[in-house]
Amino acid sequence: MVALRYIYVLALVLWLGGMITIGSVVAPAVFRTLEQTNTDSGAGRAQAARVVGEVLRQFHVVSYGAGILLGASLVTMKLIGPRPVGFGARLAIVGLMLTASLVSGLFVDRRIADLRTAIGQPVSSLPADDPRRGAFGRLHALSTALMGIAVAGGLLLCYWETRE
């Protein structure tokens, strides 16, 4: 049982820590660095967006694996030992987190990448009233909200673990 709980906590820490690190450290640092090192800040911003987009694409695979491990370890703990406290709620939170990550990685982020390709220039160079810029803004906000849901779920699960 200790090994299963260890796998559960490790997967949770990896997933939550990765999301927080990407959102609060990696993305801001990449954007700041590439905008400062390029004479054309629009080109630097476009490069930063490509880098952060690729980091997110790769991290989505990590999040899918972590979500599966979280769910599988919870179910296995229920089957072989005493049922974990709040099993149903915990499993629902893991399911919500995994769903948010899947929607973001398989649909939203792909639409963002397709839109960038179709635009063919930095999104920030488009006029503010350009519908493509508005569509990009909505997709970016949705991606951010989905990650926020996963982070909130992860924080809730961490809190749950500290209470036991």
Image: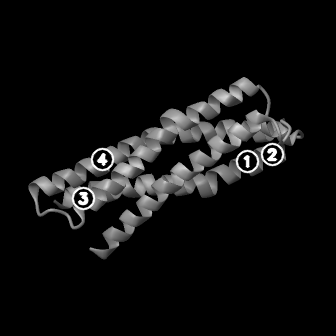
Circles 1, 2 touching at the beta carbon (< 8 Å): yes
Q: Which residue does the numbered mark 2 point to in the structure image?
A: 35
Please tell me whether mark 3 sits on a helix, a strand or a loop: helix
Label 4 and label 1: CA atoms lie apart by 32 Å
Q: Quick one: label 1 or label 3, which is nearer the N terminus?
A: 1
Label 4 and label 3: CA atoms lie apart by 16 Å
Please tell me whether mark 2 sits on a helix, a strand or a loop: helix
Q: Quick one: label 4 or label 1, which is nearer the N terminus?
A: 1
The answer to whether residue 17 is visible is no
- Neighbourhood count class around disc 4 (C-alpha, 10 Å): few under 14, some 14–19, many 20 upward: many
Circles 4, 1 touching at the beta carbon (< 8 Å): no
Q: Name the residue: 40% across, 58% down.
A: 13
Q: Name the residue: 63% across, 41% down.
A: 139
Residue mark closest to the camera, 4 vs 3: 3
Q: Looking at the picture, does residue 137 appear above or below residue 119?
A: below
Q: Quick one: label 4 or label 3, which is nearer the N terminus?
A: 4
Label 1 and label 2: CA atoms lie apart by 6 Å
Question: Quick one: 131 or 49, which is closer to the camera?
Answer: 131
Q: Amino acid at mark 3?
A: Gly
Taking the image as shown, residue 79 lies to the left or right of residue 119, namely left
Please tell me whether mark 1 sits on a helix, a strand or a loop: helix
Label 1 and label 3: CA atoms lie apart by 40 Å
Q: Which residue does the numbered mark 3 point to in the structure image?
A: 88
Whole-percent x and y of residue 151? Answer: 48, 58
Q: Amino acid at mark 4?
A: Leu
